[in-house]
């Protein structure tokens, strides 16, 4: 897996909106933050456009993303928002220019589609916060300063590989595993099953998150992964934040308990409450990179490895 070069002061980065419409003030705020980091910023022509639920028509969003991918001076592409729309672009994108000058792509949610495209083609990327987090900054009090999402994002972009330590959770399953980190939004990953962008190879350390899905829908999606043999061939599982829903007493179990049930037949390590998802607790992760995952009664520990 090819990891783009670390960012340096005065490097050029792009802000693009490949999917949902976004408040222009958030894009402006994100650009200001990136400039305060010492970076040069270009913003896609369609980044703040409004076309129904999209940030511009398909052709406009495609143009912006393709220009950023091709730009030989660009070192990172920050997607402004998820929502919906990346699926309309992925089969039209060319990675020829990107392959000559690889760059980091950062985003999550609907941007999971773009991460899958890059990983299938052998490139690492960063699952992490977008324009809103860049514009508004980290929420204080959720993490120690050194573990705040934007602090970690800057470290990853600069070439550092900070480890991740998580507290114990009653549903955790102990064990040790080594594998490539893959994952993202559960419903997006399910939508790619059986396509050329299906991105959960054997031995993966899979992380999952989602928003606005009812417990029975999450249970159904997890069973899809089970019946399709995906869960059986994992190296490990990290369960992130599932938000924007209410637990359903008619299901008799919580979402985390339902997920635990679907992997009960396997022996690989599983941890819960990974701070990744549609919440203020959304730390960045390096998709496509090899990691070790160790879980015991004290908690979980993840460390990036050098390929």
Image (cartoon, rainbow, N blue to C red):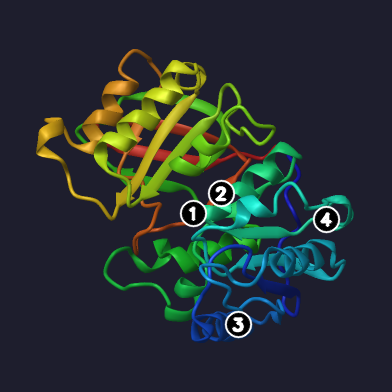
Q: Mark 4 highlights which residue?
A: 98
Q: Are marks 2 and 1 in contact (CB under 8 Å)?
A: yes
Circle nearer the viewer, 3 or 1: 1
In this view, the residue farthest toward the top is: 265
Q: Work out whether mark 4 precedes mark 1 in sequence or the reverse, and give the earlier one.
A: 4
Q: Nearer the viewer, residue 48 or 254?
A: 48
Q: Which quadrant holds residue 281?
A: bottom left
Q: Which quadrant holds residue 31?
A: bottom right
Please name the residue shown 60% across and 60% down the image. Answer: 106
Measure the alpha-carbon separation of dots 3 and 4.
22 Å
As helix, strand or loop, the secondary structure at mark 3 comes to helix
Is 214 situated above or below 222?
below
Q: Nearer the viewer, residue 149 or 164?
A: 149
Q: Are marks 2 and 4 in contact (CB under 8 Å)?
A: no
Please name the residue shown 25% across and 39% down the image. Answer: 215
Measure the alpha-carbon separation of dots 2 and 4.
18 Å
Measure the alpha-carbon separation of dots 2 and 1.
6 Å
Residue 155 drawn at (x, y percent): 57, 63
Circle nearer the viewer, 2 or 4: 2
Is 272 situated above or below 204?
below
Q: Is residue 164 left or right of residue 117?
A: left
As helix, strand or loop, the secondary structure at mark 4 comes to helix
Measure the alpha-carbon separation of dots 2 and 3.
22 Å
Q: Mark 1 highlights which residue?
A: 109
Q: Mark 3 highlights which residue?
A: 31
Residue 124 drawn at (x, y percent): 68, 47
Q: Mark 2 highlights which residue?
A: 112
Q: Work out whether mark 2 precedes mark 4 in sequence or the reverse, and give the earlier one.
A: 4
């Amino acid at each position: 897996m090819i990891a783009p070069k670390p960012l340096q002061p005065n490097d050029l980065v792009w802000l693009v909106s490949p999917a949902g419409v976004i408040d222009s003030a958030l894009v402006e705020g994100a650009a200001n933050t990136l400039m305060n980091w010492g970076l040069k910023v270009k913003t896609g022509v369609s980044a703040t456009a409004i076309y129904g639920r999209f940030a511009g028509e398909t052709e406009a969003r495609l143009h912006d993303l393709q220009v950023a991918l091709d730009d030989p001076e660009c070192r990172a592409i920050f997607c402004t928002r998820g929502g919906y729309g990346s699926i309309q672009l992925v089969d039209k994108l060319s990675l020829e220019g990107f392959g000559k000058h690889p760059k980091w792509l950062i985003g999550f949610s609907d941007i999971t589609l773009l991460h899958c495209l890059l990983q299938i083609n052998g490139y690492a990327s960063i699952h992490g916060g977008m324009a809103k987090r860049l514009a508004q900054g980290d929420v204080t009090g959720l993490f120690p300063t050194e573990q705040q999402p934007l602090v970690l994002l800057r470290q990853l972009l600069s070439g550092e590989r900070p480890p991740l330590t998580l507290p114990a959770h009653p549903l955790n399953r102990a064990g040790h595993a080594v594998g490539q980190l893959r994952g993202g939004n559960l419903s997006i990953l399910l939508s790619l099953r059986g396509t050329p962008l299906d991105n959960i190879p054997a031995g993966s350390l899979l992380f999952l998150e989602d928003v606005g899905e009812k417990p029975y829908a999450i249970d159904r999606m997890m069973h899809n992964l089970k019946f399709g043999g995906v869960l059986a061939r994992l190296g490990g599982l990290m369960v992130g934040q599932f938000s924007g829903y209410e637990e359903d007493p008619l299901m008799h179990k919580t979402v985390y308990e339902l997920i635990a049930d679907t992997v009960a037949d396997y022996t690989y390590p599983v941890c819960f409450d990974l701070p990744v998802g549609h919440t203020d607790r959304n730390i960045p992760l390096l998709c496509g990179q090899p990691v070790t995952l160790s879980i015991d009664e004290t908690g979980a520990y993840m460390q990036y490895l050098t390929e």
